[in-house]
């Protein structure tokens, strides 16, 4: 006599009703997201998201969407570099054909041609490295206090990871973050950056200083393409109540946040593991 005895196939985007299943609750899911938009001070219809199976899926969605956003944003640079690589590879074929026509005893010309081939291959390798930087964002997170799923998700999504030390309370050490960001961008200036900011770490309940994280990113040189994911598994749901960043009107725009995930089986008290992921459009 309860919904627990009813199979509901609620698969897919909640903003697109199912064309095959007659039993779904997507309209209720959309209402929930609308309530959360208002709760977090977000403009109506300004976000997308869905109800997840828990914190791990919410974090996965946040990092996956961030990576897709970054690749789409950097696509013009990728196309230019890919075209340049193809041009250099065509030139290499011409150089190799030219080398085959040079007599074996004409050492000077052969050395000159081989030198050109090597330089060409070096240019291709350099460009390929730059393309790899564009395709592989780097995730910064606190090593000992960020959710255990992050390294696994980064491996699945082919993201680089860079560990940041924590303060005694479990929050991110911003001095160490700034140092690691400078070192990273010095070696990989084209690499996009995803920062995982914890809103209530699982063990200590620490809250990262998101405004300072954003300020550090904005003031870095070069300034990377970046996104900030709020992992609010523990206290993300009660941010508007606890107000860790003071009275702010919009928990996305005011903090520079792109995605937010929280668990609904913690503070909301649902009886089975689940959560919500929200993302700015």
Image: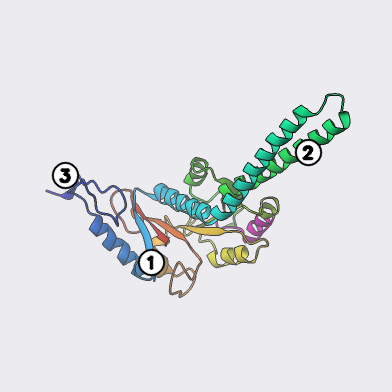
Magenta stretch bounds: 169-182
Q: How is the image coloured?
A: rainbow
Q: Which residue is mark 1?
A: 46
Q: Which is nearer the eye, 150 or 157?
A: 157
Q: Give the number of the mark in front: 2 or 1.
A: 2
Label 2 sits on residue? 116
Q: Magenta region, mostly helix, strand or loop?
A: helix
Q: Earlier in the sequence, mark 3 or mark 2?
A: 3
Q: Which mark is residue 5?
A: 3
Question: Which one is nearer the viewer's eye here, 280 or 152?
Answer: 280
State the CA–CA distance, disc 2 to disc 1: 54 Å
Q: Nearer the viewer, mark 3 or mark 2?
A: 2
For image coordinates 70% across by 50% down, the residue present is 187
Left or right, residue 46 beside residue 181: left
Image quarter in which the C terminus is found:
bottom left
What residue do we see at 50% from left, 51% from top? 67
Q: Secondary structure at mark 3?
A: helix
Q: Which mark is residue 91?
A: none
């Amino acid at each position: 006599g309860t919904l627990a005895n009813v199979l509901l196939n609620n698969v897919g985007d909640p903003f697109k009703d199912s064309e095959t299943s007659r039993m779904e609750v997507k309209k209720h899911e959309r209402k929930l997201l609308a309530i959360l938009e208002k709760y977090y001070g977000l403009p109506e219809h300004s976000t997308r998201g869905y109800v997840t199976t828990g914190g791990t899926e919410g974090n996965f969605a946040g990092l996956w969407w961030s990576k897709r956003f970054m690749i789409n944003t950097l696509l013009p640079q990728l196309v230019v570099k890919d075209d340049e690589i193809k041009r250099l590879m065509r030139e290499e074929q011409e150089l190799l054909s030219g080398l085959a026509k040079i007599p074996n005893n004409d050492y000077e010309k052969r050395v000159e041609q081989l030198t050109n081939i090597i330089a060409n291959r070096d240019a291709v390798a350099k460009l390929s490295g730059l393309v790899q930087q564009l395709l592989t964002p780097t995730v910064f997170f606190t090593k000992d206090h960020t959710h255990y799923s992050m390294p696994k998700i980064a491996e699945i999504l082919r993201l680089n990871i860079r560990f940041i030390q924590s303060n005694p309370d479990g929050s991110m050490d911003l001095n160490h973050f700034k140092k690691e960001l400078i070192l990273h961008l010095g070696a990989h200036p084209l690499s996009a950056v995803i920062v995982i900011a914890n809103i209530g770490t699982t063990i200590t309940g620490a809250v990262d200083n998101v405004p300072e994280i954003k300020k550090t990113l904005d003031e870095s040189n070069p300034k990377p393409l970046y996104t900030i994911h709020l992992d609010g598994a523990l206290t993300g749901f009660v941010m508007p109540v606890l107000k860790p960043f003071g009275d702010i009107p919009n928990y996305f725009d005011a903090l520079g946040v792109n995605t937010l995930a929280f668990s609904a089986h913690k503070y909301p008290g649902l009886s089975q593991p689940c959560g919500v992921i929200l993302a700015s459009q």
